[in-house]
Amino acid sequence: MWAWLWAGWIGYFLVIEGIALVNARHGDTLSEQVWRYVTQPDRRRGARKPAWWVWPGRVGVAGFGAWLVWHFLTGL
């Protein structure tokens, strides 16, 4: 049963991401959502320093990615 549930979840993600890629609207893909939390606000809007969530977001994404790769490679 779990294999089917994971396959369904992955399929659901692929459908959502596929729709987002086809319609090409700004901010609708997973990558664009992640970038929103790990990049500086637009300086043209008068932002002088990064928002408070920029560095914690970067550390969180990098940490999660490193752990996930390690987990997949070692099973730990």
Image (cartoon, grey):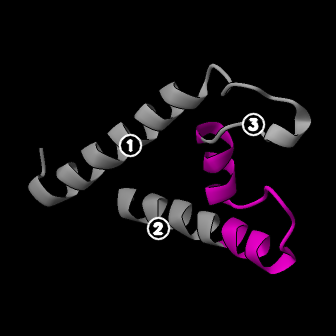
Image quadrant assignment for residue 4: bottom left
Residue appearing at x 70%, y 76% in the figure: 18
Mark 1 or mark 3, which has the lower sequence index? 3
Q: Position of residue 27 (x, y in %)?
A: 79, 55
Q: Which residues are magenta?
A: 15-38
Question: Which quadrant holds the N terminus?
Answer: bottom left
Q: Is residue 62 above or below residue 7?
A: above
Under circle 3, the secondary element is loop
- Between 29 and 51, the one lying in front of the other is 51
- Between 71 and 2, the one lying in front of the other is 71
Q: Position of residue 56 (x, y in %)?
A: 49, 25
As drawn, is 63 to the left or to the right of 4?
left
Residue appearing at x 52%, y 65% in the figure: 10
Q: Which residue is mark 3?
A: 41
Q: Residue 47 shows which numbered tag?
A: none
Spatial separation of the CA atoms under disc 1 and disc 2: 25 Å
Under circle 1, the secondary element is helix
Q: Which residue is mark 1?
A: 62
As drawn, is 47 to the left or to the right of 69?
right
Q: Mark 2: which amino acid?
A: Ala
Under circle 2, the secondary element is helix
Mark 2 burial class by Cα count in 10 Å: few <14, some 14-19, many 20+: few
Q: Residue 7 shows which numbered tag?
A: 2
Q: Is residue 53 above or below residue 7?
A: above
- Between 12 and 54, the one lying in front of the other is 54
Mark 3 burial class by Cα count in 10 Å: few <14, some 14-19, many 20+: some
Mark 3 or mark 2, which has the lower sequence index? 2
Q: Mark 1: which amino acid?
A: Ala
Q: Mark 3: which amino acid?
A: Pro
Residue 48 is a magenta residue: no
